[in-house]
Amino acid sequence: MKKLWSRLGVLLPCLLMAAPAAFASDPGTIDTGDTAWVLISAALVFIMTPGLGFFYGGMVRNKNVLTTIMQSFFIVAMISVEWILIGYAMTFGTDINGFIGSLDKVGLAGVGMSVLENGTIPEMAFVAFQCMFAVITPALITGAFAERMKFHAFVVFILLWAIFIYNPMAHWVWGGGFLAKLGALDFAGGLVIHILSGVSGLTLCVLLGKRYGYGKIPMVPHNLPMTVLGAALLWFGWFGFNAGSALGANALAASAFIASQAAAAAATVTWVAVEWIVQGKPTILGAASGCIAGLVAITPAAGFVAPLPALIIGAIGGVICYFAVAVVKAKLGYDDSLDAFGIHGIGGTWGSIATGIWATTEVNPAGADGLFYGSSDLLVAQIISTVVAYALAIVGTFILFKIISFFMTVRTDKNEEITGLDIGEHGERGYNYAIMSGSPFGETPTTPFGNAALDNAAVNSAGINGRNL
């Protein structure tokens, strides 16, 4: 009996170790656990776009809060339709000379319940997951031109941008295009999402011009609790964004999850620390901005780097993005309303370069080794891909803007900006405030003081820097 128990004692651990391998699905076979994780991740990424609406909505003046939220909310619907009709086909259809996907999957033709090629999930689950990426990317741009773009022009621009800029870039990196063949790595969207949207946003805000009164009147956030709520939803959804990009409930997803948390936390700390040193006061807006900056920076590297490099990437990202927002924007004088470029453009650029430095096949055998692991090839590929993303964003946005401007008015007029886009564009008001008299800019109360002169005095006495002035 003792011999039997001793043999069972040896056998049982072996059986337990072998069990995961015995029940794991091979590529080409649908795994229910992987499928569930990807669908949950798709839902997490979905909530990020309404969350972005709150994040941006709290940072604008109260007369433009509904317009700002409406832009994100409407994009969810419009780009979902575009993705089903043509976006998925352009991005993940059969590759045509490394440039674009063929139209063999228009309207999701041929995309049934079969397993994704070389995967363990149904292709339809992959369609849903990638749809949410296509949705949030153009929504990020809206932060750059907030409070000054007409809604009909916004609709046309975003739709054309998704078709002619996002879809090709996503194909080049994720759909087997020429950047993928070059060896570029982008785990969850540093190149495709953050650089593309941030640089496009900068280009568009320069083409539109500054908001009326920019630099002369306070344009401080009207509802910071709303912004923090939006940041929390973005942080929450980002786990689906990054860890979901492993396309399975596996060790790589866990690694990307931890990398995301590490970078977000580190960037929050460094942004607040630098802000405290430079401005003399730590702010909740700085903390919220820092966490987003860290998440942006780690996005391209999340599935390729270990936890310690993730901390470093996030920490540096927080510092770089702070100075891009608080110093560089002020010196150059462009009106990137809600710092889409300073956080997404700059953070995405740093993250893409950092991927070429710290990526390692020890974390992801399907990736490549970066500079600190003995190879400079990946860093070169990342730099080239970053330049391509900048060029596409700048040139593509410029061309689309000029075409749209030929057919319609893009910029709101002075009176509409003074009144607010909520009433001017949508006939609604976010808050039941009476319009103030005696203010040359038609501002509505944005602080408990309820008086324009006292509001300005409060802003000045608080020592708020020029970030949103």
Image (spheres, rainbow, N blue to C red):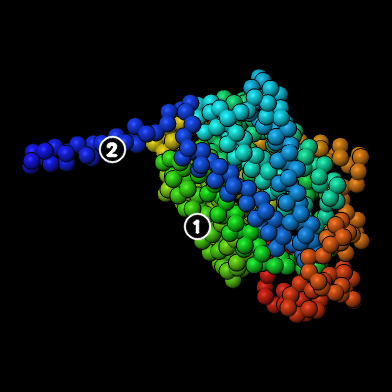
Q: Give the quadrant of residue 381.
A: top right
Q: Position of residue 214 (x, y in %)?
A: 80, 61
Q: Position of residue 338 (x, y in %)?
A: 71, 56
* Identity, as a three-letter code, of the amino acid under mark 1: Ala
Q: Residues under labels 1 and 2: Cα distance?
A: 34 Å
For the point 46% across and 40% down, the residue is: 33
Mark 2 lies on residue: 17
Q: Is residue 380 left or right of residue 50?
A: left
Mark 1 lies on residue: 265
| Secondary structure beneath label 2 | helix
Q: Give the quadrant of residue 221.
A: bottom right
Label 2: how many Cα within 10 Å (few below 14, some 14–19, many 20+) = few
For the point 67% across and 46% down, the residue is: 136
Query: Between tags 1 and 2, which lies in front?
Result: 2
| Secondary structure beneath label 1 | helix
**Placement of the C terminus among the 4 image quadrants:** bottom right
